[in-house]
Amino acid sequence: MEPPIRWAAGYVSLRHIPLPRVSAFAGEGVYTYVRDGALTLAGLRGSRAAQLIGRRGARNQVAEDARHLLLTGRLKD
């Protein structure tokens, strides 16, 4: 038996709460991670981070020196 959850009104068991959908990483969309043998921004950072960078126009996050740092762990000389 699973432990109950304490809410303001008392204790409630999870088995009585209907869940419409359960997913570890729910998300929508189609993302390209590799194009022409090279990682895309989504492939390098992940789709959610790439989406946020694109929305905010964070050009410093897509510059070649940032890409080099992520791929190698070192700053460019």
Image: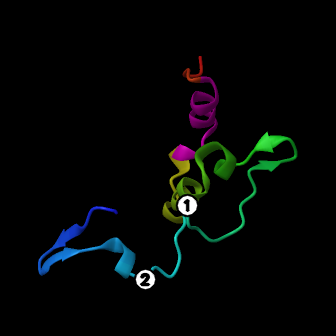
Q: Earlier in the sequence, mark 1 or mark 2?
A: 2
Which SS type dominates the magenta stretch?
helix
Where does label 1 land, which residue?
25
Q: Is residue 49 left or right of residue 36?
A: left
Asked if the stretch drawn in magenta spans residue 75, the answer is no
- Colouring scheme, one of rainbow, by chain, secondary structure, one colour: rainbow
- The residues colored magenta run 61-72
Q: Is residue 66 magenta?
A: yes
Residue 48's image quarter? bottom right
Check the image and name the residue furthest to the front. 1
Q: Quadrant of the C terminus?
A: top right
Residue 7 is marked as none
Q: Position of residue 43 (x, y in %)?
A: 68, 47
Q: Residue placed at 67% from the left, 70% from the top?
A: 29
Give above or below for 1 relative to 18: above
For label 2, the residue is: 18
